[in-house]
Image: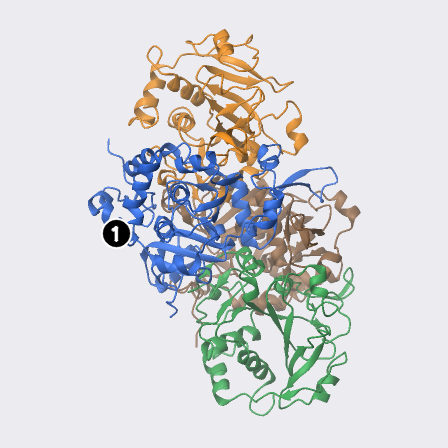
Chain colours: A green, B orange, C blue, D brown
Amino acid sequence: MRADFTEMEMMTIACARRIGNEDIVFCGTGLPLLGAMMAKKTHAPNCVIFFETGALDPALDEIPLTVGDSRVMHGASQNGSLLDAFFYMQNSRTGPNVLGILSGAQIDPYGNLNSTVIGDYDKPDARLPGSGGACDVASLVGRTRIFMKHEKRRFVEQLDYMTSPGWLRGIGSRSEVGLPRGGPELVITTLGVLDFDESTRRMRLSSHYSYAEPDGIQESTGFKLDTSHSKEEENPTLEELEALREVVDPLRLILK
Amino acid sequence: MRADFTEMEMMTIACARRIGNEDIVFCGTGLPLLGAMMAKKTHAPNCVIFFETGALDPALDEIPLTVGDSRVMHGASQNGSLLDAFFYMQNSRTGPNVLGILSGAQIDPYGNLNSTVIGDYDKPDARLPGSGGACDVASLVGRTRIFMKHEKRRFVEQLDYMTSPGWLRGIGSRSEVGLPRGGPELVITTLGVLDFDESTRRMRLSSHYSYAEPDGIQESTGFKLDTSHSKEEENPTLEELEALREVVDPLRLILK
Amino acid sequence: MVTAKLMTSSEAISKFVCASSSISLGGFTVNRNPMALVHEIIRQEIGNLHVMMHSGSQALDLLIGAGLVRFLEIAYGANGRFASTCIRFRKAVQDGSLQVEDYSNFQMSLRFLAGAMGVPYLPTYAGLGSDIISKWGFSKKQRSTVESLPNEKLIVTSNPFNSIPEQLVIVPAANPDVTLLHVQQASAEGLIRIEGLAFADIEQARAAEHVIVTCEELVPSDQLRKESWHNSLPHLLVDAVVHHPYGAHPTACFLYYDYDAAHLNDYRSLAEDDESFEAYLTRHITSLESFHDYVKLIGTKHLGSLLASKELGYARREH
Amino acid sequence: MVTAKLMTSSEAISKFVCASSSISLGGFTVNRNPMALVHEIIRQEIGNLHVMMHSGSQALDLLIGAGLVRFLEIAYGANGRFASTCIRFRKAVQDGSLQVEDYSNFQMSLRFLAGAMGVPYLPTYAGLGSDIISKWGFSKKQRSTVESLPNEKLIVTSNPFNSIPEQLVIVPAANPDVTLLHVQQASAEGLIRIEGLAFADIEQARAAEHVIVTCEELVPSDQLRKESWHNSLPHLLVDAVVHHPYGAHPTACFLYYDYDAAHLNDYRSLAEDDESFEAYLTRHITSLESFHDYVKLIGTKHLGSLLASKELGYARREH
């Protein structure tokens, strides 16, 4: 907790600020969904939120706790199936318009993600949930953004397992393996926002929150970051905090 | 018209007699459907009739005039899509149980059918409707039966175009090209019922109607038939004629 | 909210369909043909079309008869008891004015599914050994010049998961520029609901770059969002919504009205002769300003006789 | 008519599931898990199972915890806010008692679709470049001895329709011996109706050799045949129908009741410890005669607190 807002609030608001009225947002649950819901309930009322379970543009009167929650079904434009959602992402007419928000236990300098195992795949030290739809979203949609707790053990040079393809080994390698489009554009963390150098697709610091210094962010990162162009991200405004706390998550189901 | 029943009635009844209570019958419209409906309304009440449009087991209170007729929708077990119907036929659990009834403009000695063109494909003398679902049914279901007007110009040594695969070039050739199962078991015509020699899969006469002689049937066939084992098919009974005329097609929509 | 999708059929057609467009028509034989939209294409004389269909009938036959179709990929050109082969389709193929390539209904539906899924092909066993695989309607050279045609027709391939050789045929994705549908209900937002059989409408719509929908009833989006699991397409996939009651006439719209058997039988005779066919087009389409005038021409009384029983979904035949 | 499909869950499980069966479970994380059927498998101690899933949670975790699962093909073993990784799943993988192979949700859904379609594989772009393709959970040798495992995991291939090289990955069909579903409504004849999201239930059912369904409401077939376009499966595909109100508890059944957050949170703690997990199994499953006793144990009053608003489909949270 810093000043009068938490790290979780800051990163959620940083996410919300970057969602536009025309965006079609693929979401899991948790903080990324709060960010998308906040955008929809404030400056981007026409953005569409959808889930891999097949629910498109639901009312979201209450916060769903998994993407299978009945709260993703009520008031939707359509309730279909998993395949409906994934076909929508893979289809070359609709997929490019989707903005996917992902997460993971480990991330590497090219935005590849691990949510499967820590340690050896055959004899893991820790078993994680697995891809779910993350690998699919990372493979298929036009743009992705990634939510991460900014810790050295999570920002690693080499993933234990690559669940979700980011920029793979850098510029050009997505199309080399046959991925039709996409790639991560931002990583939104507890300390700042990172983007990817357009000529190399390697991660770099784009902005840092008021409570975090670029040098400290490098300290919390397990690989070398270019922090030279980082700007300070504006603190949450009172309106933003009020929207998040009172309108989006009044029961504090996700925020703490 | 012979005696007190027509050729069309005879062949429809010959078809109905050969449908059992456990059969799952794929049908187009016209005479084959009358045969299936007659079986269902008499000795095979549990047989299931379905259509390539995705309608499975409809009430069939009235005779549909195409497989897209709203009369195939009312009271069904399911109203799905074309793909639902074809997946059902291709699926190795369900497909083998389906009995498909087909038709065509030309048939060859191995039960292959043409419903696409007469003459050259690129410059046809006569353009016919094309496969519809016939090729699919002929490819995928466990057993097929074929309805034909018995005329020399229709029973030909060589098709102008093979729309729907029967036994192709004889025994073994369906599996050679990769077809998973199936093949025609009977051809029900205006003159008799033909089956296929088990060792060669070549058509032969199985039974002739009371008004047709095996020699005459050979005359009406454009290729050599083994007629030596043909037995006379029983004439329609009064009950059968009544069921067909009064219950199945009281408005004479098909029987005219 | 967003009501920019609500427009007239004239606006929708001129906005999304142009000469040389590839289009697909929803419905099946006598049901839910997008007649109002096809009338409008004929009125606007948009030609050189590439039509992709499974089973085409009345709507397709009018387009072909009006001389607007150049390329046709199709499985079936007939209308059950009303035309064992569609008349203008048959004539156009026979006189060489229409170039056609044949598929089966399953293959065409799979082609739309592949397009909807966003993959270049799908495998099936249907058609192995048949001339549908071996005989092409378009040459390799022609395929390389017409962008909307696949590079090959059908390719026989093997299953790499099986050590024992196993053959399949793969069908190329079909991605029409525009899919035209007529459905029971739609909202201004672009939600649609199909009742009864969906045929291949959903796959055809998802595979297309644009989707135009006419509907019997225009209903509030809130109403369709109540049981959203019964909606047929999400609003994002629909570009234009036009309210056209009787928009499928003379074909049926399940639960709303039956097909017009008399009209279809008349059409069959009229279509056999070039002059009487031209007269049919003039009287029913080109001399009229819109499909609303066509509905007036057919007449309330006659249309009333086609009204479907809400229980049966069709009009009970008189005994 | 045919009512031979109507039976108890005990009869259904002993008739269709046996040791070493391959099974798939319907639902998704906190919704429509086939709990009553999974309880019965645990009561009957049917082991050595091969489970194929997209996103497994509560039902799967119980089966794994009871030591009944030998092989698992899966995309996701978690339960949202109730378990960031399912507890018994995590433990079993870590201690090597469960062998797992990873796919993505799309890949698993496509595998069921391939099985439903009756083709050996389907293509996709999802997963290209990832370790999901390169890392296998089962060796080639093991695959040749376990019949329910595909010969290969995923194969990278190219698009033969395209002259420019284009890569895709093909996923092998999944055809479980039995699929277990919990749905809102079913009839004795085997008609079923799912409301809200269908998840991948339809594909999982169609891909299976047998389908067992539990339902909240047993309704007359005539009623379901009235709007048959809302039915989720035709009666021919369903082998057994069991009437089990609350059959998905502690997961939700949209429009009927919400998930039991307290129960799921308790479970997460109890599952962390082998002894308390065993006690959970004994108290809720193995010491009981049937799922009806479980419903009594949970209690009418508590279940009443989960009742869904018919308008929202879930139980409004208290502010």
Is residue D42 in sight in this rendering? no
Percent across and percent down for residue B76 are: 40, 40
Instruction: Report the number of discs.
Output: 1
**Vertical placement of C183 versus A13: above or below?**
above
Which amino acid type is marked by label 1?
Asp
Local crowd size for mark 1, using a 10 Å CA cut-off: few (<14), some (14–19), many (≥20)? some
Q: Which residue is mark 1?
A: C293
Image position of B215 with respect to C6: above or below: above
* Chain letter of disc 1 in the image: C
Residue D206 lies, in percent from the top left, at 55, 45
Q: Position of residue A149 (x, y in %)?
A: 66, 78
* Residue situated in front as seen by the camera: D10 or B111: B111
* Of A32 and C243, the residue lying toward us: C243
In the figure, is residue C305 to the left or right of B41? Answer: left
From what the image shows, is residue A48 above or below residue D71?
Answer: below
Q: Secondary structure at mark 1?
A: helix
Where on the picture, by quarter, is residue B53?
top left
Quarter of the image with the N terminus of chain C in it: bottom left
From the viewer's perspective, tell me whether residue A54 is left or right of residue A229: left
Q: Residue furthest left?
A: C301
Depth check: give the residue in front, B256 or D177.
B256
> Does the rendering let one see residue D214?
yes
The quadrant in which the C terminus of chain C is found is top left
Instruction: Note whether D304 is above or below B189 in the view shown.
Output: below
Query: Residue D311: x and y, percent?
Result: 38, 64
Quarter-of-image position of residue B178: top right
